[in-house]
Image: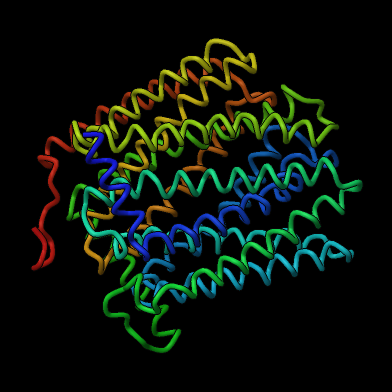
């Protein structure tokens, strides 16, 4: 078993296309981390802004909603346009938008920072969907794709965390708040440009789609709406991808509540509200625990795949993650919450890796881009709904035993329903297209 895992890792390490795509992800997601530290300071840890649950939840919705609206129309373009060109243009556009934010910081038009930041975040999500859709084109087999799915997102998350830590160090060592924000954004611009340069090492058609369609923009937009609806129908008829996406969307709601919990706890429970640096540090430690859990899932998921199907691993991860939620529910102490979030992070990422594999392998390349755009939109909408629910049920300090227990019950119900649906489908996708089995 371990020898097979080692062989798969060696195979990935000798795949030039995979290594190039991984390099793009690592460089650009490090830039994302730098960028997000500035946004966290602006939206969540700004002493001039209110720190109640309503304000924090509203800020999260504002950050996520734009892609939730525009995102559904990106999938068909990922399936129609060369994905390598999307990655190249997207990274250059992010660099330009971040540079524009730098310029706006020196003017009185501070509201433009919000607009530019939201557009940049929307592009980030589009590029992540493109990276996911292109991954099967540079990985040969389903088994190695599972290993790649466990490796790439987690390494990307680790790169984001490294970027965030660098951004935090910049905040600590630069003397003024404006200087702190500018320093992180300047480095983010450089990393986005570096990511675009790495993209040029990939062949124009190396990431697919196999037969991109060329037509006028407005006709493409109308076609995108039709093809999006066709993509939804395809996923539902196929069965297993729709079941996996529904399950992960519901679990993303749980993740969204936990995210609001640790943001509020970082600002209002574990730090002085007036000390934004300490608040970000507390939040960063909790998110670091979550990301460390993601790292553990890199090791566990490929090993688990040797003993069980991806769908079974999804159920195991959902239920295993509730152990961490139970620890969080016991006490609001920083140590207990950190430990619980770590275990929850293992379950969240382990399940996501398996779902990524199910969606990639059970979805035809013709629909794969749409599938991952739908995937991203469902995730964002779930987090927006979670933010709305948090306004009603979470205290300003974030921690609530009753909410944590309710989330545990919800996850167990979701796991049971998913397992029932998988058994009904016999854990096999239904053929929809002529060349599918």
Q: Nearer the viewer, residue 162 or 281?
A: 162
Q: Residue at x 54, y 75 (%)?
A: 89
Q: Nearer the viewer, residue 261 or 236?
A: 261
Q: Nearer the viewer, residue 56 or 27?
A: 27
Q: Position of residue 126 (x, y in %)?
A: 48, 63
Q: Residue at x 14, y 41 (%)?
A: 427
In the shown orientation, is residue 434 left or right of residue 285?
A: left
In the shown orientation, is residue 103 left or right of residue 213?
A: right
Q: Position of residue 148 (x, y in %)?
A: 34, 50
Question: Among all residues in the image, which is located at the extreme bottom?
Answer: 216
Q: Residue at x 35, y 64 (%)?
A: 369
Q: Residue at x 46, y 20 (%)?
A: 324
Q: Position of residue 338 (x, y in %)?
A: 58, 22
Above or below: residue 95 compared with residue 149: below
Question: Among all residues in the image, which is located at the extreme top?
Answer: 330
In the shown orientation, is residue 375 left or right of residue 189?
A: left
Above or below: residue 425 compared with residue 78: above
């Amino acid at each position: 078993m371990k020898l097979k895992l080692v062989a798969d890792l060696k195979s990935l390490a000798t795949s030039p296309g995979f290594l190039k795509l991984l390099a793009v992800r690592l460089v650009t997601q490090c830039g994302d981390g730098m960028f997000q530290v500035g946004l966290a300071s602006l939206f969540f840890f700004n002493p001039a802004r209110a720190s109640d649950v309503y304000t924090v939840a509203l800020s999260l919705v504002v950050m996520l909603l734009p892609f939730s609206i525009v995102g559904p129309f990106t999938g068909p373009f990922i399936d129609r346009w060369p994905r390598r060109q999307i990655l190249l243009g997207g990274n250059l556009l992010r660099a330009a938008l971040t540079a524009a934010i730098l310029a706006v910081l020196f003017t009185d038009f501070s509201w433009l920072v919000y607009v530019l930041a939201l557009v940049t975040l929307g592009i980030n999500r589009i590029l992540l969907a493109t990276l996911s859709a292109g991954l099967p084109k540079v990985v040969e087999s389903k088994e190695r794709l599972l290993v790649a799915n466990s490796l790439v997102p987690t390494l990307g998350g680790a790169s984001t965390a490294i970027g965030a830590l660098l951004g935090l160090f910049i905040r600590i060592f630069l003397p003024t708040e404006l200087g702190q924000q500018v320093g992180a954004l300047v480095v983010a611009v450089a990393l986005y440009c570096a990511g675009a340069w790495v993209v040029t090492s990939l062949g124009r058609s190396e990431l697919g789609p196999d037969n991109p369609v060329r037509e006028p923009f407005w006709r493409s937009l109308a076609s995108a709406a039709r093809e999006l609806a066709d993509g939804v129908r395809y996923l539902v008829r196929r069965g297993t991808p729709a079941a996996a996406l529904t399950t992960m969307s519901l679990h993303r709601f749980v993740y969204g509540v936990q995210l609001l919990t640790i943001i509020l706890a970082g600002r209002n429970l574990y730090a002085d509200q007036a000390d934004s640096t300490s608040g970000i540090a507390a939040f960063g430690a909790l998110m670091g625990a979550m990301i460390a859990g993601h790292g553990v899932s890199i090791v566990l998921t490929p090993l688990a795949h040797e003993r069980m199907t991806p769908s079974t691993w999804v159920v195991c991860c959902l239920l295993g993650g509730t152990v961490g939620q139970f620890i969080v529910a016991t006490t609001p102490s920083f140590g207990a919450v950190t430990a619980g979030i770590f275990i929850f992070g293992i379950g969240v990422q382990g399940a996501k890796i398996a779902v990524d594999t199910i969606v990639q392998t059970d979805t035809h390349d013709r629909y794969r881009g749409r599938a991952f755009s739908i995937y991203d939109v469902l995730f964002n909408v779930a987090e927006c709904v979670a933010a709305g629910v948090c306004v009603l049920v979470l205290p300003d300090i974030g921690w609530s035993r009753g909410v944590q227990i309710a989330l545990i019950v919800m996850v167990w119900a979701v796991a049971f329903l998913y397992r029932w649906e998988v058994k009904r489908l016999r854990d096999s996708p239904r053929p929809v297209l002529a060349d599918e089995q």
